[in-house]
Image (cartoon, helix red, strand yellow):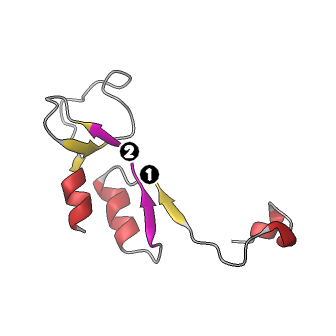
Amino acid sequence: YDLTELIPEKALPEHIQFVWHGINDEINLRQFLTSDIAWGECDVRLDPTGSELILRHDSFKDAPLNVDEGWVSFEQLLAH
């Protein structure tokens, strides 16, 4: 990436670390784990029963549960 196209070089810090945005499903988790990026961001919500922390971008109020929807638990993420 050439960050100097977005911000002057003098304004950039000497060291930049990238953060993977949106580790909210199996596909993004696999891609993140095989990348060289050390930091990741995810959205954590309670499952519909309120018993487990899961990774999901949208709230169940805004995007109701799909019949065939699966998710990654927060514990699964931490296990990696």
Residue 36, disc: none
Q: CA distance from mark 2 to mark 1?
A: 7 Å
- Rendered location of residue 34, percent (x, y): 37, 75
Image quadrant where residue 51 sits: top left
Are the residues at dot 2 and dot 1 in contact (C-beta closer than 8 Å)? Answer: yes
Badge number at residue 22: 1
Badge 1 amino acid? Gly
Q: Is residue 53 magenta?
A: no
Q: Quadrant of residue 26?
A: bottom left
Indicate yes or no whether the magenta region holds residue 41.
Answer: yes
Q: Amino acid at mark 2?
A: Asp
Locate residue 56 relative to residue 49 in the image: left or right: right
Residue carrying label 2: 43
Left/right placement of residue 73 relative to residue 23 reads left
Q: Magenta stretch: give its range.
A: 38-45
Residue 50 in percent (x, y) is at 17, 31
